[in-house]
Image: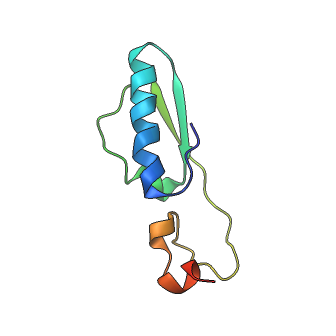
Amino acid sequence: MFPWLASGHLIPFLELSNALAKKGHTISYITTPRNLTRLPPNLSPLINLIGLPLPPIQHLPSDADLTIDLPSQHLRP
């Protein structure tokens, strides 16, 4: 699983991961290390959490791992 970096995508992808794990599938859930700390702790042992750091991007805050982390001026053209 590689959810879009928006809070509305992290939890639904995690719920899908849990449903698939209940059926016996091993899941790799990939997101940024900071986003991994935002996930609930009650995960199936079949879900492997993988932290993939984002490279720095010019004109964006270094701690913006979700769209909600962006200041409003970054969201407006």
- The residue shown at (47%, 39%) is 13
Colour scheme employed for the rendering of this structure: rainbow
Which of the pair 25/8 is nearer the observer? 8
Most extreme residue toward the top, as rendered?
A: 24
- The residue shown at (57%, 75%) is 62
x, y percentage for residue 28? 55, 32
x, y percentage for residue 32? 54, 54
x, y percentage for residue 44? 36, 26
Quarter of the rendering containing residue 23: top left
Q: Quadrant of the N terminus?
A: top right
Quarter of the rendering containing residue 22: top left
Most extreme residue toward the bottom, as rendered?
A: 73
- The residue shown at (47%, 49%) is 9
Most extreme residue toward the front, as rendered?
A: 77
Q: Quadrant of the C terminus?
A: bottom right
x, y percentage for residue 74? 57, 81
The correct choice, above or below, for 24 with respect to 19 in the image is above
The correct choice, above or below, for 72 with respect to 55 in the image is below
- The residue shown at (54%, 86%) is 73
Total numbered labels? 0
The correct choice, above or below, for 17 with respect to 75 in the image is above
